[in-house]
Amino acid sequence: MKLKVLGQEKIAQYEFTGIEGGFGENKRAMLVKDIAAIHGSTVKRINELINRNRPRFLTGIDILDLKIEKSMVVLNDLKFSKIEVNNANNIYMLSERGYAKLLKILEDDTAWEIYDELVDNYFNMRQAIKADNKALVANKRLAIMEENAKTRKANLLYKIAMATESQSSAQSILALAAKELTGEMTIPFMKRKEYSATEVGEKLGISAQKVGKIANQLGIKAEQPGQNRFGRWANSKSRYSDKEVAQWLYYQAGVNKIAEFLREG
């Protein structure tokens, strides 16, 4: 494994050790200890997230464990002391792809803003700068920024859709999000799991009547014949006649709300 330590890099307000190699020629990488500092986290927490999802990170493509490589020369160059090396279970280094996978686990807006900054100015700029091609640098930066802007917009639309009580409106908003990413207006098929009061009661160990009572107490049922993020009204046949009666069906958010009430009670 051939690594080149580029020294201290500064992108916006973030400082870290620049590394080249490990994942291919001219490919840049970052240490987990630097990623933790940039995201205001700890090495222990980031390592725990990675280890919990370790099968998702491909060795040699997404991630390298420098502790396993056992190259003290490399670790010394990266300013790791012998004590740090001996005490560490893992000393992870991530490629751009590995870093992107980590952000999917972190899932916060600040993390993606930092990622955009690092992709624009660290991971993807080395080759163009090395060739001293100013036009290529400018075009590459513009293309990356436009792609990142589309991703951010799609992510915002997705969050709005998830907070929208009307299922049809949510579908329309998700279609707009899909258009931002694919260029095509596609209507996603939204199928939520629904539970009757009896099924909710069986899951939570209470009666269907108590489920309904708690739901009314919490005020999570929409006005008939509407719906909201907790559930929807549906017509079902009465057990005692041929008439159809209105029944409130619970989405997972509704089940969670009742479970939360029971825990707090």
Image (spheres, helix red, strand yellow):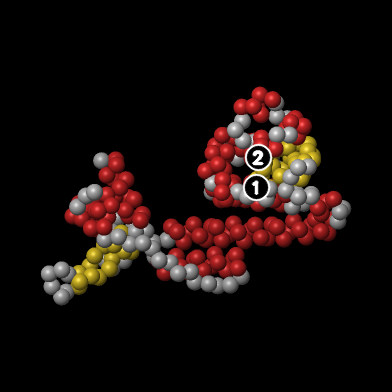
Identity of the residue drawn at 29% across and 40% down:
264
Quarter containing the N terminus: top right
Residue 126: x %, y % from top left: 79, 50
Which amino acid type corresponds to the residue marked 2 in the rendered image? Asp
Quarter containing the C terminus: top left
Identity of the residue furthest to the bottom in this view:
242
Quadrant hosting residue 251: bottom left
Any part of residue 88 in sight: yes
At label 1, counting other C-alpha atoms closer than 10 Å, the crowd grade (few under 14, some 14-19, many 20 or more) is some
Circle number at residue 59: 1
Identity of the residue furthest to the right in this view:
132
- Tag 1 secondary structure: loop
Residue 47: x %, y % from top left: 57, 38
The answer to whether residue 256 is left or right of residue 21 is left
Quadrant hosting residue 178: bottom right
The answer to whether residue 34 is left or right of residue 165 is right
Which amino acid type corresponds to the residue marked 1 in the rendered image? Thr
Q: Are marks 2 and 1 in contact (CB under 8 Å)?
A: yes
Whether 114 is drawn above or below 143: the answer is above
Circle number at residue 79: none
Whether 74 is drawn above or below 101: the answer is above
Which residue is the site of mark 2? 65
Residue 31: x %, y % from top left: 67, 39
Whether 115 is drawn above or below 241: the answer is above
